[in-house]
Image (cartoon, rainbow, N blue to C red):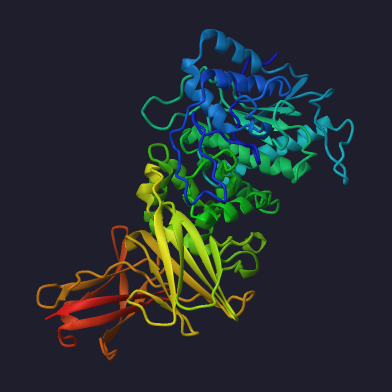
Amino acid sequence: MINSWRRCHIRIPYCVFISSLVIPFLFTASNWARAQYIYSPQKLSTEQLVQYYRSLKNPSKQRLLSNESINGKCGFGVNAALHNQWSNFTELQKIEINALLAAPPYQKDRFIGKFHIYYDTTGANEPALLDASNQRISNTAEEYVDSLGKIFNDVYQIEIGLLGYAAPPFESGEMYYRIFVSDMSNYSPGTYGSTSWDQNIPPLNSDGSAPRYPCFIELHNDFSGFRTKGMNAVKVTAAHEFHHVIQVGSYGLHDDELYVHELTSTWIEDAVYTDVNDYYNYLQEYFNFFSNGISFNYYDFYRGGYERCILAHYLAKRFNQDIMRYIWDGMKTLSFFKSTNTALVNYGSDLKSAFSEFTFWNYFTSDRSDTVKYYSEGNRYPRFRPFQKKSYQNIPDSVGGYVYPLSSSMFEFDLPSDTITVMIGNIDVDAAEQKNGITSRVNIEFSSSVPSIPYQEFNNGLTAKVIVADTSLWHSYFSQGVSRDTVVNPVRFVVSSNASPNPFRLTDSQRLLLPIQDISAKTADVYIYSSSLSLAYSKSLPVSIAGSNRVIVVQSSELKSCLSSGIYFVIAKTINSEYRWKVAVIR
């Protein structure tokens, strides 16, 4: 008989997540723009949690939250709630939960490499290989366990040996990582596996860093009813679940950022087994839902974080795979956003700049993909759904909406023979971290006349101007297509960050600072035009790094002989972007 253990699931594709101790508001397509986040809703009571585990043991007997079983699917969040509420249960409740979660006896167990695998050779839990028709092959339990053991040891060698993550601790009294193979009938359909730890033990650390716990894994016994089946499902589940063991055991549990656990484990599947691609199944949720200007750290029942693995794919391709390990190392003491920013600074970037570029990358998927420059498998990704799509009949016109901090949205303008897309990135990281639910308005004015700077001019004579309250918290990109189905190179980004100082006093100021967000630019061509559009100055200048910012520095000594008092238009062109400012010069 195996000792009692408690289940805290992490990997449950298409599962319903209950955020740690809370039930968040569910957005719909019709009400999201008027709704506010509810980050502090009613907590799950201890009785509700007991009820949940009763339904897990016998789903037909009792449903979670009085018929609010959220499709009968469960996940890591509600188990994290159990973890946080454990001290609040009565002794009778603890006894009942212990009984509900006690492991059944297994008929056999084997040691394979670093893993101790428990399984049955008869009955419902008996594992089996699948034939070409995805039907179970009789009497293949041992072969299944052989394959499972090899796969998990391969995963260990890649995630620990090759990718460099810290080896997780063993459970007390163990010298191997435990894996239990079952039909997982106690769980909702679609459950690949789970990663769990004992609720009765204290964390391994007491230094104030994220709490760490030794974990064990439960795995499905045949994967016959899944979109990814058989050994391919075993591969990605092994990569996914063992990385949860690494996360919780080596770096710490973040029960207020559960989506980060899932986005990382879903990304690592492809890093370890790039040919399986089970993660494709979750991307539609990101490209359809988060395109509504939803904060990247939003969390609800149906969006547990698998879909946000797309950010890890961007970071790994844009920088390298090591950045995800650096982020988790920083998360021992920092939040995900703060740790990500710290890691990016070491790569010469920052979270605001990277999220802006991430928004831009998400335009280049599906038929618009460039698998060399952007996502390596972007041709298999869905398109980013426009937040608003409008056909223009009369010019001028405008469109806009309210979006949440640290979000991406796209506005598509259909003309008779052309399509213009505006990609908007809100980069208010601080507001997103505060989870205050405040939205910000963005308007895009579309015209055939020339508006005030900054604006974007297209080759058909039209202009677009993005209007927001604080330009430092927004980045905008534009793309113009020759038809609705063909996209040409994107029109260069026009930034709205301010030049400084402005006004620029030639006799008092030593330099003019021009901020840019192109994280790959090394140099920029700078042009300064008078109000009559006569070229007064031009020079190629290096891009300097000042803290987390990138600036072009124009020395006043170079401008004193070129400029007189007046209004000037300043343009800077990098290899990827174009920036414009309006500066008042005083001699």
Whether residue 246 is visible to the viewer of this picture, yes or no, is yes
Q: Residue at x 41, y 61 (%)?
A: 442
Which residue occupies the foreground of this view, 299 or 367? 299
Of the 4 image quadrants, the one containing the C terminus is bottom left
Is residue 487 shown above or below 296?
A: below
Residue 340 in the figure: left or right of residue 285: left
Which residue occupies the foreground of this view, 303 or 335? 303
Name the spot of residue 149 as percent of width and height, x first. Answer: 71, 35
Is residue 29 shown above or below 481?
A: above
Q: Seen from this angle, which residue lies furthest front?
A: 394
- Number of marks drawn: 0
Res. 433 image quadrant? top left
Q: Residue at x 15, y 86 (%)?
A: 564
Name the spot of residue 17 as percent of width and height, x first. Answer: 58, 35
Whether residue 346 is visible to the viewer of this picture, yes or no, is no
Is residue 395 shown above or below 300?
A: below
Q: Residue at x 43, y 68 (%)?
A: 444
Q: Residue at x 43, y 44 (%)?
A: 336
Of the 4 image quadrants, the one containing the N terminus is top right
Residue 541 in the figure: left or right of residue 21: left
Name the spot of residue 354 as percent of width and height, x first. Answer: 43, 58
